[in-house]
Image: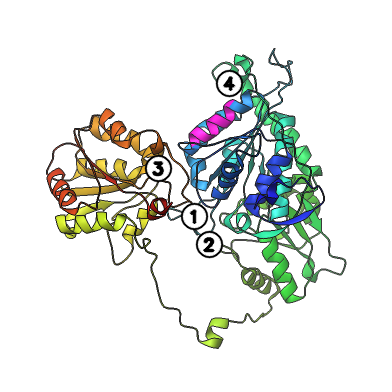
């Protein structure tokens, strides 16, 4: 798909939402990109990785999302246009770096910028939410909450063309206001294909220069409070941009409105609304918001002041709905606001959900065809399973030979081995987040005398498992940790990981683990013996199960 590099302004090509974000960054003149693989954002890093030798842009797969964001912050501080990309849970990992980053790179309204000179860098953060949990087992996270927490300008695209255009706008806002900007697509946006009109590429090799300026880059008292005031002033300035931005627009309704009903929405729900209205052969005024934060409040007030009813269509928590309720008190206190009383707060939206909501509002009955019942389709229930030839089968085979499953607790972590918890395997008694398998194992072992085996993958170990391992050793716990080293980040597309240059067993040994064995799980006799031996130890034990992913082995 190297058409992404076609420098033909005006040409239209079909792109995924993620590919359009890549193109938008290249049209913006991005210099530095960092990422940690996580679906639904993985394609962004994949494309920069594949194109890295053909474009003058630095790209890296970072150890985790926090490190990826910190690297992008450092490049932006040095005057480069930078971008970091990750999935929703990655934002949780790097929020500690993001919040203070919002305080930096500022220009006070009361004094000129110090000797650092004009800030020419930019920082765009792409965070892909997985509404519907298509690839995110742990929770259905709504990352829009962080927009308010961090005061970060947030754009929500609804299709690939907007993905490209909003990426360019994000870089422009970041450079103009010296602030990080967040783009929040969802799975339905990142993996949607549509024609995208290309702009001009801006590819140029650039080296940065960091200018010392503690007033801009050191977030400490007493300067800290002034930085926060500057950030809030900046948000007010960006709000004026939001008010006048064409990415917030009204779809007019030329004919009389039924019951004076309007709709306010943002992101992918906009497309569901269009499909629903088309199905109903109905026209209603729609306010579509590309800016989620800061909201164009005056535009919202103008839209709702003559309405009798308004339907807020958004996925997950009702952030827009609460804002509209607040604004309506002053301009239209009698306005009837419909939202989560009709629109589900769990799972992805569908056009029929919008149809149902409008039917309830209008006291009408709309019949929705149930095709499954019409054709009486019976789909057999199937559980996802490990690939044929996966080396993890051998790990489970050895454990079944070594222990009574009912007498051992099994800890899970994030990776292909999440499938250990599916029938008929049933080798997973808890699962939370990256690296938590070891941290929770330590707590269980301190609280009980039960035997415990916990699994963690190689990439996940480097991402977040090392601190938990150190903690278990330091606090004298004794879980058996099996590190599944299949020599790649398999679940998200076989991206490279630090194990290519750093041996996992060297890290484990350096953390103070004495009971350590590196075993090819194909050697079942040795593996079974090690499991039995290490389960009886009073200290942390680690087995590095060393065999490549079947697809890596084929290559």
Query: Is 152 contained in the magenta span?
Result: no
Element at label 3: helix
Camera-nearest residue between 523 and 274: 523
Residue 358 location (% of width, % of height): 68, 70
Q: Residues within 10 Å of mark 3 (few under 14, many from 20)?
A: many
Spatial separation of the CA atoms under disc 1 and disc 3: 23 Å
Element at label 2: loop
- Sooner in the amino-acid sequence: mark 2 or mark 3: 2
- Sooner in the amino-acid sequence: mark 4 or mark 1: 1
| 1 vs 3, front mark | 3
Q: Quadrant of residue 178?
A: top right
Q: Residue furthest right?
A: 254
Magenta-highlighted stretch: main secondary structure?
helix
The range drawn in magenta is 66-74
Spatial separation of the CA atoms under disc 2 and disc 4: 40 Å
Q: Give the numbered dot on residue 391.
A: none
Say which residue appears at 28% left-offset and 63% top-offset.
425
Spatial separation of the CA atoms under disc 2 and disc 1: 8 Å
Please give the residue where the numbered disc 4 appears in the rendered image.
224
Element at label 1: loop
Q: Are marks 2 and 1 in contact (CB under 8 Å)?
A: yes
Say which residue appears at 38% left-offset and 38% top-offset.
499
| 4 vs 1, front mark | 1
| 2 vs 3, front mark | 3
Please give the residue where the numbered disc 3 appears in the rendered image.
459
Please give the residue where the numbered disc 2 appears in the rendered image.
347
Q: Is residue 18 above or below residue 150?
A: below
């Amino acid at each position: 798909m190297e058409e992404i590099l076609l420098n033909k302004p005006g040409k239209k090509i079909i792109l995924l939402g993620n590919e359009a974000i890549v193109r938008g960054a290249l049209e913006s003149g991005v210099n530095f990109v960092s990422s940690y693989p996580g679906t639904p954002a993985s394609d962004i890093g994949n494309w920069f990785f594949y194109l890295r030798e053909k474009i003058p842009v630095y790209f890296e797969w970072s150890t985790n999302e926090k490190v990826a964001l910190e690297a992008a912050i450092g490049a932006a501080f040095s005057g480069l246009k930078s971008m970091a990309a990750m999935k929703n849970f990655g934002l949780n990992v790097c929020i500690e770096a993001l919040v203070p980053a919002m305080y930096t790179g500022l220009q006070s309204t009361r004094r000129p910028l110090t000797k650092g000179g004009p800030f020419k860098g930019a920082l765009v953060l792409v965070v892909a939410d997985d509404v519907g949990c298509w690839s995110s087992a742990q929770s259905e996270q709504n990352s829009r909450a962080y927009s308010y927490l961090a005061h970060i300008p947030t754009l929500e695209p609804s299709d690939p063309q907007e993905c490209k255009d909003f990426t360019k706008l994000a870089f422009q806002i970041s450079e103009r206001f010296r602030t990080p900007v967040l783009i929040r697509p969802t799975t339905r946006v990142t993996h949607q294909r549509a024609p995208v009109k290309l702009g001009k590429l801006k590819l140029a090799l650039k080296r940065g220069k960091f200018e010392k300026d503690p007033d801009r880059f050191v977030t400490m008292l007493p300067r800290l409070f002034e930085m926060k005031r500057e950030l809030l002033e900046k948000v007010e300035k960006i709000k004026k941009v939001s008010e006048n931005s064409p990415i917030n627009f009204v779809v007019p309704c030329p004919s009389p409105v039924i019951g004076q009903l309007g709709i306010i929405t943002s992101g992918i729900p906009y497309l569901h609304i269009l499909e629903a209205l088309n199905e109903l052969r109905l026209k209603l005024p729609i306010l579509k918001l590309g800016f989620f934060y800061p909201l164009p409040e005056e535009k919202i007030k103008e839209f709702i002041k003559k309405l009798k009813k308004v339907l807020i269509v958004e996925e997950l928590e009702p952030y827009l709905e609460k804002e509209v309720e607040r604004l309506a008190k002053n301009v239209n206190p009698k306005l009837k606001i419909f939202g989560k009383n009709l629109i589900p707060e769990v799972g992805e939206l569908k056009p029929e959900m919008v149809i149902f909501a409008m039917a309830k509002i209008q006291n009408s009955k709309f019949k929705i065809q149930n095709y499954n019942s019409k054709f009486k389709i019976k789909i057999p229930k199937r559980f996802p399973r490990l690939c044929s030839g996966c080396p993890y089968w051998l790990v489970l085979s050895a454990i079944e030979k070594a222990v009574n499953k009912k007498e051992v607790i099994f800890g899970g972590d994030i990776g292909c081995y999440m499938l250990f918890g599916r029938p008929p395997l049933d080798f997973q008694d808890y699962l939370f987040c990256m690296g938590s398998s070891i941290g929770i194992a330590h707590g269980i072992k301190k609280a009980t005398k039960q035997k415990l085996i916990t699994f963690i993958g190689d990439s996940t170990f480097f991402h977040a498992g090392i601190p938990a391992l150190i903690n278990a050793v330091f606090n004298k716990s004794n879980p058996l940790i099996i590190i599944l080293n299949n020599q790649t980040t398999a679940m998200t597309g076989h991206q490279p990981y630090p194990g290519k240059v750093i041996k996992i067993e060297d890290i484990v040994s350096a953390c103070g683990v004495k009971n350590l064995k590196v075993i090819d799980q194909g050697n079942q006799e040795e593996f079974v013996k090690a499991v039995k031996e290490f389960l009886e130890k009073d200290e942390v034990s680690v087995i590095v199960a060393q065999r490549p992913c079947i697809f890596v082995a084929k290559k």
